[in-house]
Image: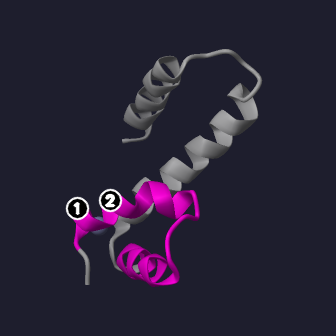
């Protein structure tokens, strides 16, 4: 079973649905057992949805989006 550090490496691709079936299985197995990572992935997923909805038509730079993401992240942690 993979640990948190290994799982974290997969999160972006997992959310982008770019993982192989085998890797998805590894990530999901970890998420079932690890509330910390589960919360992290759920947060990332929610944040992506938010950014997609709110900012897709805006001209915000990736740097600004990063700052906003960080701020939101701190608020929920
Ligand atoms: Zn974990």
Can residue 64 be seen at all in this image of the molecule? Answer: yes
**Ligand 1 is in which quadrant of the figure?**
bottom left
| Residue under pointer 2 | 8
Name the quadrant of the N terminus: bottom left
36 or 48, which is in the foreground? Answer: 48
The label number, if any, that marks residue 45 in the structure image: none
Q: Residue at x 26, y 66 (%)?
A: 6
Q: Residue 36, can we see it?
A: no
**Could you tell me how far apart the alpha carbons at marks 1 and 2 are, in whole angstroms?**
5 Å
Residue 64: say if magenta.
no
Disc 1 secondary structure class: helix
Residue 4 in picture, x, y percent from top left: 25, 65
- Tell me the quarter of the picture where residue 76 sits: top left
Q: How is the image coloured?
A: one colour
User: Which residue: 54% across, 59% down?
Assistant: 15
Task: Point out the stretch of residues depicted in magenta.
Answer: 3-31
- Helix, strand or loop for disc 2: helix
Give coordinates of residue 20: x percent, y percent: 50, 76
x, y percent for residue 43: 50, 50
Magenta residues: mostly which secondary structure?
Answer: helix
Residue 54 picture quarter: top right
Determine whether the beta carbon of the residue marked 2 sits less than 8 angstroms from the nearest atom of ligand 1. yes
Q: Are marks 1 and 2 in contact (CB under 8 Å)?
A: yes
Image disc number at residue 5: 1
Left or right: residue 2 compared with residue 16: left
Asked if the magenta segment contains residue 26, the reply would be: yes
Can you say whether 19 is above or below 25 in the image?
above
In which quadrant of the rendered image does the C terminus lie? Answer: top left
**Above or below, 47 relative to 59:** below
Q: Please tell me whether residue 47 is drawn above or below residue 30 in the rendered image.
A: above
Badge 1: residue crowd in 10 Å (few <14, some 14–19, many ≥20): few
């Amino acid at each position: 079973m993979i640990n948190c550090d290994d799982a974290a490496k997969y999160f972006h691709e997992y959310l982008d649905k770019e993982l192989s079936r085998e890797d998805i299985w590894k990530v999901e197995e970890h998420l079932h057992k690890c509330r910390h990572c589960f919360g992290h992935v759920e947060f990332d997923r929610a944040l992506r949805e938010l950014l997609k909805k709110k900012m897709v038509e805006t001209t915000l730079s990736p740097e600004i989006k990063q700052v906003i993401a960080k701020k939101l992240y701190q608020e929920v942690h």
